[in-house]
């Protein structure tokens, strides 16, 4: 059976990782693109700060092409035994093209308002999460600069994460993914 590769895309803080973590117990393998960049930073002895991770992401794309971050997760996809793999944090069509080599790719976009996203990112507590509106806007602009708006626009389905509880968000994503496996 061909693997179903569900690419979660959306602006930072929209709810992608919440969905991924919520669906893990249902047997899906989860691969986080940001973690791939964080691992690369670790290999290079770089502090996983907002600035360093942002620069590294751009450097990887400059050196190895726009699909570079997707190339970093190839070993995880190849070693996965699950029929459904969720890729958390796809940012460009070039990454999607790399992922298509491994299975049937579907794009699920998550939308949330800027206020919701900023509020969530402030509470999340990752080393690269923005603590000011200025940092938040810089990060949004960097994401838009690598083409995330294209992957959002070309999604197979979109969830509006406005007024949903965490459980409703996860269940909504689950129902959509289930419809793709039938």
Image (tube, grey):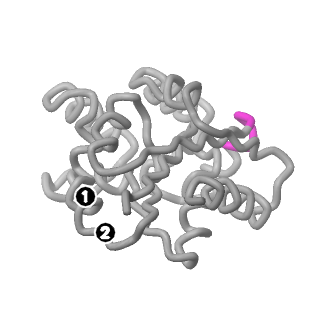
Using the numbered discs, state the Cα–Cα distance from disc 2 to disc 1 in whole angstroms.
Answer: 18 Å
Residue 125, placed above or below residue 128:
below
Quarter of the image for the C terminus: give it: bottom right
Q: Secondary structure at mark 1?
A: helix
Where residue 28 appears, as percent x and y from the top left, is 48, 69
Q: Nearer the viewer, residue 115 or 25?
A: 25
Q: Secondary structure at mark 2?
A: loop
Where residue 97 appears, as percent x and y from the top left, is 32, 34
Q: Residues within 10 Å of mark 2 (few under 14, many from 20)?
A: some
| Dot 2 or dot 1, earlier in sequence | 1
Residue 167, placed above or below residue 120:
below
What residue lies at 57% left-to-right and 52% top-to-bottom?
Answer: 16
Q: Nearer the viewer, residue 63 or 8?
A: 8
Where residue 46 appears, as percent x and y from the top left, is 21, 51
The residue indicated by pointer 1 is: 39
Q: Nearer the viewer, mark 2 or mark 1?
A: 2
The residue indicated by pointer 2 is: 80
Picture quarter containing residue 175? bottom right
């Amino acid at each position: 059976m061909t693997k179903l590769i569900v690419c979660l895309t959306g602006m930072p803080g929209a709810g992608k990782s919440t969905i991924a973590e919520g669906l893990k117990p249902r047997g899906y393998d989860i691969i986080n693109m940001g973690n791939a960049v964080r691992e690369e930073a670790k290999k290079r002895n770089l502090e996983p700060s907002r600035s360093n991770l942002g620069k590294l992401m751009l450097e990887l794309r400059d050196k190895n092409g726009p699909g570079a971050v997707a190339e970093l997760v190839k070993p995880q996809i190849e070693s996965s035994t699950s029929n459904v793999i969720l890729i958390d944090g796809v940012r460009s069509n070039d990454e999607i093209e790399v992922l298509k080599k491994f299975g049937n790719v579907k794009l699920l976009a998550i939308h949330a308002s800027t206020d919701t996203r900023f509020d969530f990112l402030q509470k999340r507590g990752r080393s690269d999460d923005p603590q000011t509106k200025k940092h938040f806007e810089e990060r949004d602009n960097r994401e838009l600069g690598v083409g995330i708006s294209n992957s959002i626009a070309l999604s197979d389905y979109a969830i509006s994460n406005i007024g949903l509880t965490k459980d409703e968000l996860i269940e909504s994503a689950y129902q959509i993914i289930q419809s793709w496996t039938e």
